Image: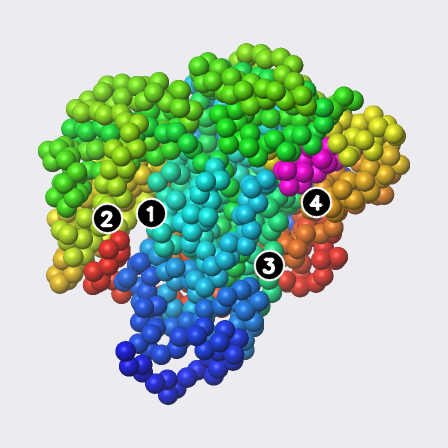
Amino acid sequence: MADQESSNATVTIDHADDLSSLVRDCVERQQPIVDYGIAHAHLGYPPPPRHVRLVQRGAVIEHYDRDMTLRAAAGATMGELNEHLRSRNQFLPIDADSDLTLGEVICHNVYGPLRATYGAIRDLLLGLRYVDGLGRQIHVGGRTVKNVAGYDLSRFMVGSLGQFGVVYEATIRTYSIPHRVFCVELQFNDATVVDALLGEWLLTDAAPGWMLLKMTEDGAIVRLGYFGRATACEVQVRALESMLCGRDDVQIMGTDRRSLGDDADQRGARRRWRREATGLCKVIVPPACTGALCKALSQWAADHALINVDALPVHGCVFAGGTIDGDFALAMDQQINQLIDRVGGRRVWYRRPEPVDAIDPYGPAGPDLSILGALKHTMDPNDLLNPGRFVRPLPGPLLGSQEELV
Amino acid sequence: MARTLATDEHPAIAPLRKIVGVKGILSHRDELIVYECDGFSVAKGLPLAVIFPTDTQQVAACVEILNGHDLQIIPRGSGTGLAGGAVAYGPGIIICTSRMNRIENIDMQNRFAVVQAGVRNLALSDALTGTGLHYSPDPSSQRASSIGGNASTNAGGINTLKHGVTTNHILGMEMVLADGTILNARCGGLYDGIGPDLPGLICGHEGTFGIVTRVWCRLVPKPSHRRTVYAVFDSTFNACKTVSDVIADGILPTSMEIMDESMIRIVEDAFHFGFPTDARAMLLIEIDGIDQVLDEQLEQIIHIAQDNGAQNVEGCSDEARRDQLWSARKKAFGAVGRVSHSYCTQDACVPRSMLPDVMVKVGEIGRKYDIQITNVFHAGDGNIHPILLFDEDDPEQVQRTLRASQEILEHCIDIGGTPTGEHGVGVEKLHLMDRMFTPDTIDTFKKVKFCFDPDGRINDAKKIPSDKTFIELVKPIAANVPGGAL
């Protein structure tokens, strides 16, 4: 462990007991512990000035390959985990960059187009171990695929931004690597056509295993993939051709057969712009409004600057941003807020260009923030874990106004 | 029926009656008997009253009134729980959501439904008939159980192996807290939120955080094509190994159910499906997906079963035959009632690969305590349901049954499993929580409960041990309730 007395020391942790000790030491010193992750380092509010920066190392602890479950330390990267699983023809069906740790994936609820088939990390998570704000090691869930003993704090930690505990170990479901991936690229004249089609589309054999929408100057490109045996994929592609036959608002631009690894790499390359953007906003809307929101945002931005807009139409998730300055980000934020006011939705800024304070990263507080504040106070009473990042603790249960919390 | 006069009516009841109306409250002893237990008939407690609000505002108003009285509030859906979670211990009022039965909205485009908590699981499925979408969680109780109850217990079912349990299909929940405030946890039908997954925490709370009043349910495409495999084995061990081998081979069936030798005989004697009564185990597997490729998977499964010594394997796509096979599975619990007046259904879950050994252990424990144990279970999930048959008029046999149950559950915990995969803890398994969780984890659970219910007024001493209320189950004589457990 590094010298944590100095300002903003980085402490590398290998074992849960060391993590517990670190937290207890920090409680004594009233020194915040910060782990914002790699891809989410700029999400939300900046860390407090004097803090300990936590880095966890990790690896596969046990792979129960016949049960298709994996127990791993939170510091293991997705690349390391998938490398291990590949030898047993398994994988973690999460669209996450290979340098992200399992802990970051859980705490930031990282998901991508694969969610359409495999669910998000909340659906894969079976058990979790974390250290709370008092340094205690808490074990919830386990190795079994069904378990209703105790409260489901595993799922509660998903998307918690590391504010309620430091996750140090997780047990998750794995899946068999599909025999083949067939990818199809579609050009839509208008992104709102995707909204109109999707409901019926998902009920057919042409329902894709994954789907990603990308706005272009000419409309929208939708890339999608089918998994499984070649015969199954061929049936699905034919069903898609049949579904689109006679339509003049969408064209099949090409098809491609890949391995799962190549498929994952290509999706990774397409989202790389998000890591390089100076401003990045994630918007959640009702799925049937995804195309409309993408179109409106792209049309608005076309008059001002070039931004990237891509989306997961199945789940109503849109990412928008690029190399933008603070003024543009502020204007874009106002535009997004107007759009989501119309259809209902939420947005969060993953990265805000300077001056960052001009934009509230999370938007209006949700109605559940009061209870989250109480839970924060319970699980991290000294407010030392990623303090103030999203939820600030309440002095007592259900007290105080929501405005006081964020 | 003549009603007992309520000569000593609790002072809370009159104001509650004003809110829910005369027909919205039961407070006479003979009316309350029905509500003294749920499906776990050993745990019994007579509530002071049962109220039947029809909307969230009525629930909140009733809770506010009850705030002025030192009474427990016990949420109840349809009363199909199997762990005593809806039983009033001490002076308490049951808030029953069965009249909150409106499906408020079905949004086909965004694939979700908003339902009041009392909507029956099957009622939502019925409402979705012909749409191509369905609400996937399918607990065996789905004809009677409510979606609010399913969400509160994180109910499982037969098709959860591929499609997940209740928590995988809940987008948001509305809940009335102990102080009467209405908590909105990701209500609105979005597929993601910002911050921690509060609905994920609430799901499975067993009515200890508050009263769930509305649920946002995710709807998914209903599988249109399926195949069923029926395989007979000379040992439960081999049937269990087949389950593990199928999944390890990359196939993810929707369901994999096993009946052991005694259960096959019980079902066959009762319903005459034509099953071989000398078989040691029967495995039912169902797969769904694209019609053109299901036959290929079917063959793959049949080969795996044969490699594991299956004596008779049948793959079928015929709906009538499929219905017959699954009818046999679903009637299993009912058939047990023909051979034993009393039985105790357990609900442990273990890693799937441990099933063969666990089933051997269950047999050993049955022999050790001289208790007949029959088994029908969700093998794909590793979720076992040993059914212990006993004579309730024989106190010594009842005690042996209890000890055998305890030993099975403790063994499952000790090898990395859980004492409850889908029925819940309720009051039945409270005593096992200390074995399952560390003291720090139990303490965290208590503090989490405190955040929602600081005074311990909502269903206290259920799900987790309470510092305020101590429940000691008197467990000797189980009533003759099908599906009931000790």
Residue A351 in picture, x, y percent from top left: 76, 34
- Of circles 2 and 4, the one toward us is 4
Horizontally, is A138 left or right of A279 in the view?
Answer: left
Measure the C-alpha gap from mark 3 to mark 2: 38 Å
Residue type at numbered disc 4: Val
For the residues labelled 1 and 2, say whether their Cβ atoms are less than 8 Å apart: yes
Give residue B348's mark: none
Residue at mark 2: B333
Horizontally, is B254 left or right of A138 in the view?
Answer: left
Which residue lies at the image location 53% right of the left edge and 64% below the top edge? Answer: B55
Measure the C-alpha gap from mark 3 to mark 4: 22 Å
Which residue lies at the image location 55% right of the left edge and 59% below the top edge? Answer: B175
Residue at mark 3: B183
Residue type at numbered disc 3: Leu
Residue at mark 4: A343
Residue B176 in picture, x, y percent from top left: 55, 63
Q: Secondary structure at mark 3?
A: strand
Could you say which quadrant of the image residue A47 lies in? top right
Category of crowding for the residue at label 1, using alpha-carbon neighbours closer than 10 angstroms: few (below 14), some (14–19), many (at least 20): few
Measure the C-alpha gap from mark 2 to mark 4: 48 Å
- From which residue to which does the magenta span run? A279-294
Mark earlier in primary sequence (1, 3):
1
- Of circles 4 and 1, the one toward us is 4
Are both tags, 3 and 4, on one chain? no
Which residue lies at the image location 49% right of the left edge and 50% below the top edge? Answer: B203
**As drawn, which residue projects farthest toward the bottom?**
B7
Q: Chain of mark 2?
A: B
